[in-house]
Amino acid sequence: MGSVACFHHAGSYHSRSWLDDSRLPGSASSVVDMQFASASHFPVDLHVPGRRFGFLRINETVLERSTFLDNRIEAPLHQAEWRSLEEVAASVPQPAAPPMWLLHTSFCCSTLLARALHLPPSSVALKEPLILRRLADAQRAGWAIDPFLPPTVALLARPWHAGGRVVVKPTHVALNVAAALVEAAPGSRALAISTGIEAFLISNLKKPPATQQKIPELAQRALEASGLAARLPPAALAPPDMWAVAALQWCAQRETLASIRTRIGDQRFRMIDADVLLEDLPGHVAAVADWFQLQPSATRLRSRVQAVSTVHAKSPGEIYDWTDRARETRYLLQQYGDDLRRTLAWAERWVYPAMSSDALALERTAPQYLAGAAGASA
């Protein structure tokens, strides 16, 4: 499998709109915003070998407008102010409420769900902060990340409004550190959103060539995180085409989700399939909000869901009908049905026998977000 860089170039930003207005001269809160207690003093980068965090002062507009908060954030990363791990750990306050974690396996409507749950002042969704990708990369490279976990969680959990909650959606390549993040935030919960293997393969097929070129690297990372590679036969580690590589990625991610569930326990873990989410988006988003203890206004939540469901989740300026997703899938199934069936047969022969029973039965045995949600919140 070839190695492909996983990030695009940094996104553009517009004039000074990324700047937190409270930083301007004469602002009464400018001194407060210089302190680590302010969520607007945001950790935009992390250098694990150098043991330092990078910060920018941003406002909520950046959270809303940025597709992701990695190097595509709508803010000038090159202007980040660097602070040592020791200073950050000693200065950031312990969160009044833990963050909630939205885990995912890519191409599964996780960005749509995160946008639906972004409802200030009651809740703010942080979509794929770069510091979590940095932790994942460091873990993969063999660096010790334990000292970074408490300050990372505390920084991300800071409320943007009094009494508000934070939902954090890590990148899917950070599944290798997901369990550690949940454990570092007592009282936090995790919801994993995923798709079946057929939907995952079709989603990969719909992506542009630049995205498809990343599949081998992503599959390799998923295999390393899951431990599945050690159990696979040689034929499984020599996939014949892009379809099989994507299937290998899906299988490895299921193993990782199963291990996360085992490690943090069913009391803190829920799972939902993307197709189920889309069957009743308003109802399911409300149930997820309840599981995450966000307590939004029902009226505002319905309005928010309606607003985000009419645009593309990763390109909010683009009108998109989410019912088109099913039509696209049906068309591609007709066009590429033979390839799909061949890939499923390959996975069933070479990969499934090496998978754990927990991973194979994840949908059937993992607690769904509706079951027990109300009781767990009591």
Image (tube, grey):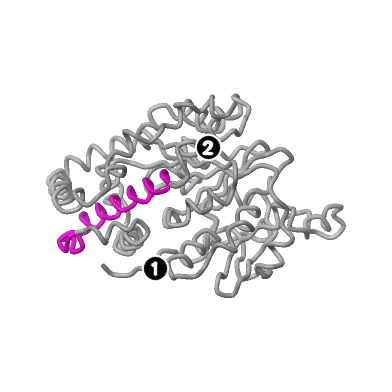
Q: Residue at x 81, y 55 (%)?
A: 32
Q: How many marks?
A: 2
User: Which residues lie in the magenta part?
Assistant: 233-262
Q: Mark 1 and 2 residues: CB-CB less than 8 Å, in contact? A: no
Q: Quadrant of the N terminus?
A: bottom left
Q: Residue 13 magenta-drawn?
A: no
Q: Position of residue 37 (x, y in %)?
A: 74, 53
Say whether residue 327 is left or right of residue 270: left
Q: Which amino acid is tagged 2?
A: Ala
State the residue position of label 1. 5
Compared across the picture, whether 350 is left or right of 60 comes to left
What's the amino acid at mark 1? Ala
Q: Is 79 on the left or on the right of 4, as rendered?
A: right
Where residue 121 appears, as percent x and y from the top left, is 68, 38
Q: Position of residue 370 (x, y in %)?
A: 45, 27
Quadrant holding the C terminus: top right
The correct choice, above or below, for 170 with respect to 309 in the image is below
Circle 2 sits in a helix, a strand or a loop, which is it? helix
Mark 1 to mark 2 CA distance (whole Å)? 29 Å
User: Callout 1: few (<14), some (14-19), or many (20+) C-alpha neighbours within 10 Å?
Assistant: few
Residue designated by label 2:
116
Give 101 or 75, whichever is nearer the viewer. Answer: 101
Residue sitting at x 83%, y 58% = 31
**Residue at 49% from the left image edge and 36% from the top image edge:** 267
First in residue order: circle 1 vs circle 2: 1
